[in-house]
Image: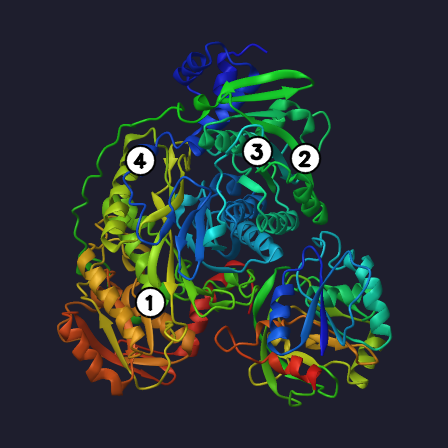
Amino acid sequence: MNSSVIVFPGSNCDRDVATALTNLQFKNKMVWHKDSELPKSDLIVIPGGFSYGDYLRSGAIAAKSNILKEVIKAANSGCLVLGICNGFQILIETGLLQGALLRNKNLKFVSKDINLKIINNENKFCNNYKKNSVISLNIAHNEGNYFTQKDHLKELEDNNLIPFKYCDVEGSINESSNPNGSLNNIAGILNNNKNILGMMPHPERMVDNLISNSNGIELFTSILS
Amino acid sequence: MKITKEIIDLHGLKSEEYSKIKLLMNREPNYLELGIFSAMWNEHCSYKSSKIHLKKLPVKNKNVIQGPGENAGVIDIGDGDAIVFKIESHNHPSFIEPYQGAATGVGGILRDVFTMGARPIALLNSIHFGDPSNKKTKNLLNGVVSGIGGYGNCIGIPTVAGETKFNSTYNENILVNAMAVGLVNKKKIFYSKAKGINKAVVYVGSKTGRDGIHGASMASAEFDENSEDKKPTVQVGDPFTEKLLMEACLELMKKDSIISIQDMGAAGLTSSSVEMAYKGGLGIELDLDKIPCREENMSPYEMMLSESQERMLIILEDGKENEARQIFKKWDLDFVVIGKTTNTKNLSLKFKNEVVASIPIGALSSKAPLYDRKWVKKKLDKKKINIKEHKKIKFDKAFFELISSPNHSNKKWVTEQYDQMVMGDTIERSGSDAAIIKIHQKDKAIAMTVDSSANYCKSHPLSGGKQIVCESWRNLVSVGAKPIAITNCLNFGNPENPEIMGQFAENILGIKEACEFLDYPVVSGNVSFYNGTNNNNIYPTPVIGGVGLIKNLNKIQNHKFKKIDSQIMIIGKTFGHLGQSAFINELYDIHDGMPPEINLLNEKNNGEMILKLINSENINSVHDISSGGIILALAEMSISSQIGIKIQKPQKMSNIFEYFFGEDQGRYLIEIDKNNLTIVEKKLRENDIYFENIGITQKEYFELDKDLKIKVKELYELNNRWYNKFNGLNN
């Protein structure tokens, strides 16, 4: 499977995603933000980081970059697109995903391992996870507090477009297991076609038991299968 | 402009120093030249008070590639890899402007590391604040922590270890020390020494603004009630630009274009150009009209003294200009040839076709003042602490109070603001005895720690100096790493005061003795004097940053209990020394008495034994015993693993408080599978290592005979209680 990782000057998880993808047998290429052509890709990853510094709203400038025009075209024609952390913020800014990522409720950067409950696994990113299972991934962000309009939230819930929510170690989804104030503990969302996933947690950080755990692997192997 | 006494004072120069300038110049300096002298001759840049003492420190062992004197120290970790690391202070700016002060502290130390060709792989810090009840503390704490996080998180280097401490001695002068660690190919290390005449001197990075002018001089004087007015001397950081600069420099370093490279840190363009020329025995000529400026009408004085961040000076090989320019263009950074190297041994500055300054390079560096300041030995505090003479307190109450005190409470509210996992190689994060970072895609790792013990150093600078080196060494040993070398950040008060200078001199001797004994040399560091306000000096607070190597990723250990019903053992002898302990300090407010003694031989033997036990996989967990004694160390092991303990009081114990809260040195707690107990005991006896079995691990409860029983869960809550209360949080 061919994957492309988009590299902005302030991306800082580009190498981490590329390492994970390559170790899992993706044929991966790095794509520079000034490029105006995408290599042939089955999966496009927009990695975490600070794209152009994010001094304006996170991801706002990146959404207008050369390469994003190509990503939008590819996404609209069905290519799988995964936005992690800053990548999620950028996808929101492009309009490929709806809603907003506000500042964390406590107004502080938050970096820690959190638990996620797999709410919906019937999509190309999560089908290797068991429904309702609890996994642990790492988060690290300042603006991960997901918000959207009531009708859109209903659409997300009704159409199984929320793959995972923050939960505690036993799997209960409540306020104390919500690290950033996200609406309904939402940690990631899909578009209607389910070919675009935006998520705040970092699956690429959880692919090696020596480093942390390997709960992130199934996300990538789901894509492969 | 006529140079008056007032102007000289404002530049922080003494009248005898000004006379020396006239002598070296053979004339009166002009205003710009005076500014340049002040930037180079201040304490921060010249090390004029510390140099003669620093020379005593050991700086070599078989792993050291580069010791002090470069942007950072370099050690060999085998297979062609080397580790570059250094710690530096940003105390004064952080007190004036906590967010930017701390952020630019991180930015500055990162540049020191990538200037040498290394990709930074970890950040650490040591931050000291005043009493939590002091009205400034909360704002300073939150600002500093956000600043450290803001910079490191954005540039994408994990912040993996550190210490956050409180003591009223820092009420009017906080400490912010940042350490960076990088990885480099041993054959591609870059240095600052210029070579060759008529080589292009290139300015890269951010534009020069009016921020940070006289930052280094500000950091070389005590604060007074007007210190707030010094805000404009604090630089403003831009981690995004630093990221661009780092990537561009590392990309250029893959080619053979750079002769030498130096970051513009303290004293900006002045110190970087002077240092490069001085080390190469050359002169340098700069055309100031070419400097990329952020603001209009900047004067040569402002350009030379600005401490705007994220800038570098590079001396390029002939014919490599275009290749280099393309790389910086790719990263949207300024790239301007601003001058050339000369054979004049002179710093020559041109502006609007006029020579505006001409100073012999030697006058700014090797001929800078050097002081052998008067110092006095610290008198021994012979007072013995007898706990029986003081108020009675129940053991469990004392323990609960200590574990929920500001200094011993869980610091995850700090570390959760730092991205610890970016780069994907963090094996052990904050909270461990040492952080562990895997060498990317290789089967080895490095361990890192930062440590300080201001209370010990204040009461007896000599043993305090030894102790901090030993503690650093012990922390690395506890995770299974072989300690290699250290970097030190020496935070002291006013060196013109003989008592303070005495603290410094004796402390250095302590550090030297321990480093020599443990073959744990100093490869880089920084001295920060004048930490104090209105003659109130801080406690002497040297901070040690240690780095060790783990050759086998299967032989890593940590302090988390692994199993129920395994044996808990103390390695090293417990005498019950309470002088300067956390217990006596925090619960009884007693601050005199001697710190614990250091026995370097035991320290070394015990540590080497621990490494052997880790390597033979005989033990399940290890934790060094430090502040708070055995009981605090046990609590940390329990809290991190959610496994309880059942401990018996040893029969030989004289007093329960002395035994469990005493801070005798050179000790470790280990957890042993009962099946392995005989073999471990045999090894310990064969090597004459003192040990005591004190109990076992159990489910749920943290229990010490009849004196203490609490659920581990509740212990965890106690340990987290203080910060939530401090910041008005409920969860």
Q: Do the residues under discs 1 and 2 have CB atoms within 8 angstroms?
A: no
Separation of residues labelled 3 and 4 (CA atoms): 26 Å
Chain of the residue displaying label 3: B
- Amino acid identity at mark 4: Ile
For residue A169, above or below residue B576 = below
Judging by the rendered image, the residue that carries numbered circle 2 is B336
What kind of element bears circle 3?
helix
| Residue A193 pos. (x, y %) | 83, 80
Give the side of residue B329 with respect to residue B557, left or right: right
Q: In the rendered view, would you say B267 is above or below A89?
A: above
Residues behind callouts 3 and 4 on a single chain: yes
Mark 1 or mark 3: name the one nearer the start of the chain.
3
- Farthest residue toward the front? B319
What numbered label is drawn on residue B135? none
The residue identified by callout 4 is: B500
Q: Is residue B202 left or right of residue B385?
A: right
Q: Secondary structure at mark 2?
A: strand
Q: Is residue B394 visible?
A: no
Output the chain of dot 1.
B
Identify which amino acid the numbered label 1 is placed on: Ser
Same-chain status of marks 4 and 1: yes
Residue drawn where x is 23% and y is 33% of the image: B376
**Above or below A69: residue B554:** below
Q: CA distance from mark 4 to mark 1?
A: 34 Å
Left or right of A206? Residue B178 is left
